[in-house]
Image (spheres, rainbow, N blue to C red):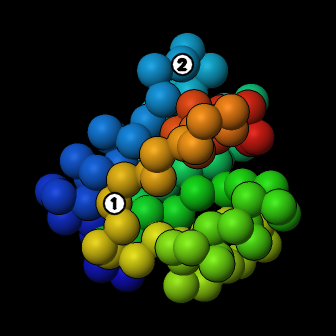
Amino acid sequence: MERPNAPTVAAFESALPNDPRSLRGQMFGHACAFANGNMYFGTFGQTLVARVGEARTATLLAAYAREAFENTATLPPKVKKAPKAKAGTSNLRAGRANEA
């Protein structure tokens, strides 16, 4: 598998929440983040992957993602930032650590 390039790693790092529960690491040479001992966000080649709940998986698939794997939404390369939260809803970026 192709290793993530610098822009993909930069997108990953910019999307990480500023939360002490979120720990950076690597899985098979790919940048990833862990919360509560579970990987919840990372890179795979030139894509970003995020572990999310079932409801959010359906929402992301409908709006942005190209495929899902067991409640993991794989964002296409052109979507490198989390969508802005609508008023009264939680932001994807802020909520990832809580979902892990």
Which residue in the structure is indicated by mark 2?
A: 19
Query: For residue 48, what is the image quadrant?
Result: bottom left
| Residue at image mark 1 | 80
Residue at point 68%, 38% (across, down):
89
Q: Position of residue 28 (x, y in %)?
A: 46, 62
> How many residues crowd around disc 1 within 10 Å: few (fewer than 14), some, or many (20 or more)?
some
| Vertical placement of residue 24 versus 81, above or below | above
Q: Which amino acid does label 2 sit on?
A: Asp
Q: Do the residues labelled 2 and 1 touch (CB within 8 Å)?
A: no
**How far, Cα to Cα, is label 2 from label 1?**
20 Å
Q: Nearer the viewer, mark 2 or mark 1?
A: 1
Question: Which residue is at 58% across, 43% downward?
Answer: 86
Say how many tags the image has.
2
Residue pictured at 23% horizontal, 47% vertical: 10
Which residue is at the far front?
Answer: 87
- Three-letter residue code for mark 1: Lys
**Residue 6 disc label:** none
Say above or below: 64 vs 40. Answer: below
Q: Position of residue 57 (x, y in %)?
A: 72, 66
- In the displayed structure image, the side of residue 72 where residue 55 appears, left or right: right
* Callout 1 secondary element: loop
Direction from residue 36 to residue 19 in the image, left or right:
left
Q: Residue at x 51, y 73 (%)?
A: 64
Is label 2 in a helix, a strand or a loop?
loop
